[in-house]
């Protein structure tokens, strides 16, 4: 999720950190449709499910992020700039088009949510305070899972990917406000006792997801509009790292990443209400677009594809509010299809 321009308005809130916003929608429902033209890139049209949030008076913005499915198949979404007392983590019933509060507190600026395969709890990255917070699945019993410095530097934790054993891999988006390559990938053991820097010198690390085989990590670098690939060994160390995809985003920047069962990458675009879809070899397969780009809609930050199905739900935000859109993904969802 992009937070570079949020630092100015959010500074009034005590330290929500360097974030960014967007949102709005058109009146449409149902599944996304695909449009193919000879010699042209495939376009997948997303359709509005519902409006989840409005701009908060206290913060002057709303920013939806971190869509993920819980064990019961309920969609969970975070609102990064929600003020104290307002829902910061929400359950969404996409069938009834209703939402309810799952978690709130007085200080967190949560940029992602993921459920651990190890203990089933939800893990939230607090970008502003450099922490990972973990409530129970029902939102009770919130605990600070990780806090403090890593190799002497405070994190700006953005997105999360879990390995199959329940260890966390966090995109540390340091350097985004300065435009410098201080970003990192940090591995945190599932008990929270040890944090290890796997890669540094990254340009505002943002999206993070394992590939379909859990052999490596896809990492988006916001300020260089590229996706890097980190190959891992059996001990969860990095054996190689390279630029895998250069994203032609124009005015947009690379945000969060999700991966489907076929290994396709769904790259969210901050600054454009769209997602770019690539195969594992870097070929651009499609662009997911919202219809007619309504006024006030600026960014698609993230996506979750329902496990075992192809229904995808994309978070879209802007001056008109925070919305949920749906489309048909190119392949089925898995646990890695929740975009951090």
Image (spheres, rainbow, N blue to C red):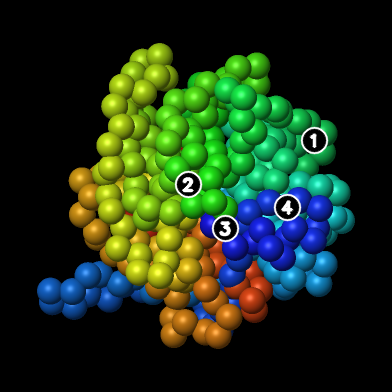
Sequence-earlier tag: 4 or 1 = 4
Q: What element carries label 1?
A: loop
Sequence-earlier tag: 3 or 4 = 3
In the rendered image, which residue does mark 1 sit on?
Answer: 142
Residue at point 49% right, 52% down?
A: 179
Residue at point 77% right, 65% down?
A: 59
Q: Is residue 101 visible?
A: no
Q: Residues under labels 4 and 1: Cα distance?
A: 19 Å
In the rendered image, which residue does mark 4 sit on?
Answer: 16
Q: Residues under labels 1 and 3: Cα distance?
A: 28 Å
Q: Say above or below: 50 vs 302.
A: below
Q: Which of marks 2 and 1 is in front?
A: 2
Q: Is residue 5 left or right of 256 when viewed as pictured?
A: right
Q: Which of marks 2 and 4 is in front?
A: 2
Sequence-earlier tag: 2 or 1 = 1
Q: Nearer the viewer, mark 3 or mark 2?
A: 2
Asked if the residues shown at circle 2 and circle 4 are in contact, with their CB atoms under 8 angstroms apart, the answer is no
Asked if the residues shown at circle 4 and circle 1 are in contact, with their CB atoms under 8 angstroms apart, the answer is no
Sequence-earlier tag: 1 or 3 = 3
Q: Which of marks 4 and 1 is in front?
A: 4
In the rendered image, which residue does mark 3 sit on?
Answer: 4
Q: Residue 180 has which mark?
A: 2
In the rendering, at what x and y percent does residue 236 appear? Answer: 42, 19
Q: Dot 2, how many residues are within 10 Å of its Cα: few (below 14), some (14-19), or many (20+)? A: some
Q: Dot 4, how many residues are within 10 Å of its Cα: few (below 14), some (14-19), or many (20+)? A: many
Q: Residues under labels 3 and 2: Cα distance?
A: 12 Å
């Amino acid at each position: 999720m992009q937070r570079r321009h949020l630092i100015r308005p959010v500074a009034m809130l005590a330290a929500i950190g360097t974030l960014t916003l967007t949102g709005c929608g058109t009146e449409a429902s149902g599944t996304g449709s695909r449009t193919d033209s000879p010699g042209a890139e495939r376009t997948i049209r997303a359709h509005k499910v519902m409006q989840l949030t409005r701009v908060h008076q206290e913060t002057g913005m709303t920013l939806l992020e971190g869509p993920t499915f819980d064990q019961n198949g309920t969609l969970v979404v975070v609102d990064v700039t929600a003020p104290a007392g307002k829902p910061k983590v929400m359950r969404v019933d996409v069938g009834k088009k209703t939402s309810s509060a799952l978690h709130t507190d007085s200080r967190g600026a949560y940029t992602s949510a993921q459920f651990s395969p190890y203990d089933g709890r939800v893990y939230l990255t607090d970008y502003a305070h450099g922490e990972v917070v973990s409530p129970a699945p029902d939102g009770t019993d919130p605990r600070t899972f990780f806090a403090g410095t890593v190799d002497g530097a405070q994190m700006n934790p953005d997105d999360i990917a879990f390995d199959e054993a329940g260890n966390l891999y966090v995109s540390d988006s340091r350097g985004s406000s300065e435009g410098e390559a201080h970003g990192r990938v940090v591995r945190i053991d599932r008990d929270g006792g040890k944090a290890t820097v796997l890669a540094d010198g990254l340009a505002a690390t943002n999206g993070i997801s394992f590939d379909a085989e859990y052999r490596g990590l896809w990492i988006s670098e916001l300020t260089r509009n590229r996706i890097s690939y980190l190959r891992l060994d059996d001990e969860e160390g990095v054996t190689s790292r390279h630029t895998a995809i250069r994203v032609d985003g124009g005015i947009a920047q690379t945000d969060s990443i999700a991966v489907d069962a076929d290994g396709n990458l769904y790259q969210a675009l901050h600054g454009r209400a769209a997602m770019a879809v690539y195969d594992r070899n870097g070929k651009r397969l499609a662009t997911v677009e919202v219809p007619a780009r309504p006024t006030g809609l600026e960014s698609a930050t993230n996506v979750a594809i329902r496990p075992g199905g192809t229904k995808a739900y994309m978070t879209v935000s802007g001056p008109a509010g925070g919305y949920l859109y749906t489309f048909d993904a190119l392949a089925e969802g898995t646990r890695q299809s929740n975009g951090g």
